[in-house]
Amino acid sequence: MIDLTRAIPPVPTELDTGLRVALSAMIAANDIGHKLRFNRVGGDDRDRAAGALWLSRRLNVELDSGRVIVGNGTQSLLGLIFYEVLGANTVLLAEALTYPVLQPLARRFGIRVEPVQIDEFGLIPDDLEEAIERTSAKAIFCNPTVQNPTAALMPEDRRAVLVCIARRHNIPIIEDDVLGALHGLQPRPLAAIGPDVVWYLQSLSKSVALGLKVAYLVPPDTEWRDRLVASAANHSFWFPAGLSGEVATSLIESGEIGTIASAIRTEAEVRRQMAKRILGEDRLSSQVGGLHIWLPMADASSAESFAAEADRRGVKVRPSSVFAISSASRQSAIAGVRVALTTPLTHQELTEGLGHLASILRASSSGTALRQVRTSG
């Protein structure tokens, strides 16, 4: 099987070089044992300073390290927010198609996730406002930059509207900007527009390596930062692992992380251009810095049929139903298939997989029913 389901970063030589530099320096310092002796509760001072430096590049502001929490991946940090900010028996709003782990994770904390309709630019403001009033939601989760799974890029004017809605209803936004470091400075993250109402999340899982398991959270202020860390200071499952934290901090301090992220972005762009050439750029939605593309379909059943046919031909992709919050949103949300471009190790394997998908598009009735969308970049 050719796996096109996992949007994990490629492995450029710059990653191996950067890790070699970081690990060699740690060994040469002859104090790595001491650095791993204690837990890093939300990251130590160096970790937070490095995180602030790295995130400042994307937020385009000088970030106060006192607001940064370092955790063992995005899910652990979401858990802190769910426990301390939302609490049980509350409602979280999210895009009708969203990160598949969000709903089961929220359920563990007694939180119900309700869908908000999306279009080719992401969350629809009018539907968001209606959902807030209807559900008395406690928070909003969204992924406005290279959205998972639709690859939508929300324009800045809509981002400003979402921030205004959040302020008016006194409801926080949890922004997942996992691909932001690969996309660029524009449009600005929601956290740069409304830092007072946005909880900003960025993991290194796409811009460095999935297995590093380091992510950063920036709450609206230092008071919230201290409250979250104190609430779970004795629960070490969410702390960054000592070695991972040390590696991430060293990569940032040395500047190697920028070289690695740039190489990943370059390779992702090469593969995006391959997809546009093989599948036809009028048949897909994609963004610079994305590790996946989106093939819009006429409806949910067409997406399911396409994925099933791809599976029969030895290619695994994910239909929109995998990302749907509910059965209702599965039918009412925009439909399509997510194709991850960076799972295959070689261009040859990716070319073969995309060739099978192109053949299905040409041969199937769902292919002729694809909505025409404008790609960016």
Image (cartoon, rainbow, N blue to C red):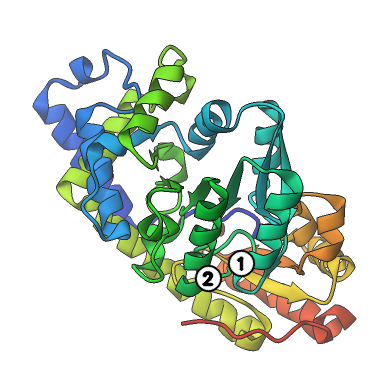
Residue ID for mark 1: 122
- Toward which corner of the image does residue 39 lie, by quadrant? top left
Q: Is residue 2 left or right of residue 273?
A: right
- Residue, disc 2: 158
Q: Is residue 211 left or right of residue 14?
A: right
Q: CA distance from mark 1 to mark 2?
A: 9 Å
Q: Classify 10 Å Cα crowding around label 1: few (below 14), some (14-19), many (20 and above).
A: many
Q: Nearer the viewer, residue 144 or 364?
A: 144
Residue type at numbered disc 1: Gly
Percent x, y of residue 146: 52, 65
Pointers 1 and 2 in contact (C-beta within 8 Å):
yes
Taking depth in this image into account, of 252 and 171 the one nearest to the observer is 171
Residue at point 40% right, 16% down? 233
N-terminal-most mark, 1 or 2: 1
Residue 250, located in which quarter of the rendered image? top left
- Identity of the residue drawn at 60% across and 86% down: 374
Is label 1 in a helix, a strand or a loop?
strand
Specify whether residue 273 is in view.
yes
Residue 212's x, y, as percent?
40, 38
